[in-house]
Each structure stands twice: as structure tokens, then as C-alpha cells.
Image: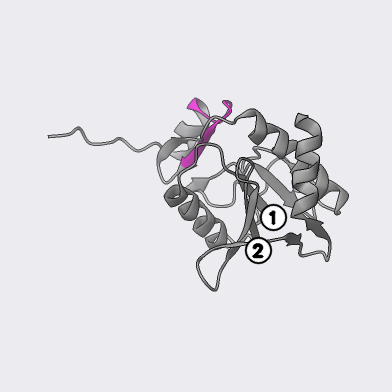
Amino acid sequence: MPAATTLLTLEQYREQYAGEAGWEYWFGEAVRKPVPTWLHGILQVILSDLLYKAGYYSASELDLRIDPNWEPRPDVAGALTLEQPYPTKPIDVAIEILSDDKMGPLFAKCRHYVRIGIPQIFVFDPVARDAWEWSRETDSIERIQSMRLGNGSVIAVDDVWAELEKRIA
């Protein structure tokens, strides 16, 4: 008979994992994020910079302390207002970048972002050079050609890939 999993309290998680990169708190469990590749890391920098230029505060791997049962660290976070030291209200944009991610857990993460009130969720695949936005209507991701942001700014996906190519050349 398998041993029962002991769930962590949020306080235990923060004591043991919050200071380490690559961990998230999911409903009593410390969940390891995929280890980022060079493409992933460079794309994080590019997307953070483009969000900043579009009028957002931006950061990578920022703890979202909105739900006491779920503390994700989006690859890139964007907000029109800066709440310090951690967001306790929904941010405006969450971006996930594929490394070795599987779609099932990624979809679960997107659904939780919706549940906690994040209005825009994007997913980027730096290997396939694809980008999607989460659709509440279809409960799935839909391919996009541009990020049409809530503040009216538009970031063309082709510009993202062109900048990535420039930085890895």
C-alpha cells in the first residue's frame, strides 16, 4: 500500500521552498517547475521588456499570493499597478513559456489563473515559435498573431520571434 502524501501548509512551503527558484505551491504540495532552457530564459527577458514598453510593470518568476492554496510563479507577470512586495490581487497578464511542460498541467495552470481573476493569459513555445492566448469561451488556448493587451497596446508575435532570433544569432 503506497504511503499517504503529507500535505504542506503554506507556511511550511514558504519556509522550505519559497526562497528557491523553480517551485510553486499547489494545494498543499510543492510542485517543481520545468527547468528553463536558454530559449526559455531569453524569451522571458524579451517578453518582460516588451510588456514594460507596452506600459506594464513586468517581472519573471514572481510569487502570486492571491490564493492561500495556490501560489504560482508565472514565467512573466505584467501589471498596470505595482503591488509590493507580492501581488495579493490579480495581475493583468500572466505568460507561460514552454520548456519541457506537458499540456495537461499547463491547461490546469491556465484554468487556475482564470479562477483567481487574471484577465489575460498567454503561452509561448520558443522552439515551435507558436503563441496562444487562453480563451474563457473555449476553455483552451487559441493561436494568436499578436498580444492585444487590456491597456490597448498590441505586441506582434512576429516581433517577439524576430527579437529572439536576433538575440540568439
Disc 2, SS = loop
Q: Which residue is drawn at 45% across and 32% down?
A: 12
Dot 2 corresponds to which residue? 119
Q: For the residue marked with disc 1, what is the amino acid? A: Val
Pointers 1 and 2 in contact (C-beta within 8 Å): yes
Residue 37 position within the rendered picture, expressed as x and y whole percent measured from the top left: 60, 29
Residue 101 locus on image (x, y percent): 49, 41
The amino acid type of the residue labelled 2 equals Pro
Q: Main secondary structure of the magenta part?
A: loop
Q: Is residue 130 something that shows in the picture? A: yes
Quadrant location of residue 8? top left
Q: In which quarter of the image is the C terminus?
A: top right
Image point 51% across, 48% down: which residue?
68
Region rendered in magenta: 16-25
Q: In this view, does 71 lie above or below 2?
A: below
Q: Which of 133 and 136 is in front in this view?
A: 133
Residue 125: give its label.
none
Q: Is mark 1 on a helix, strand or loop?
A: strand
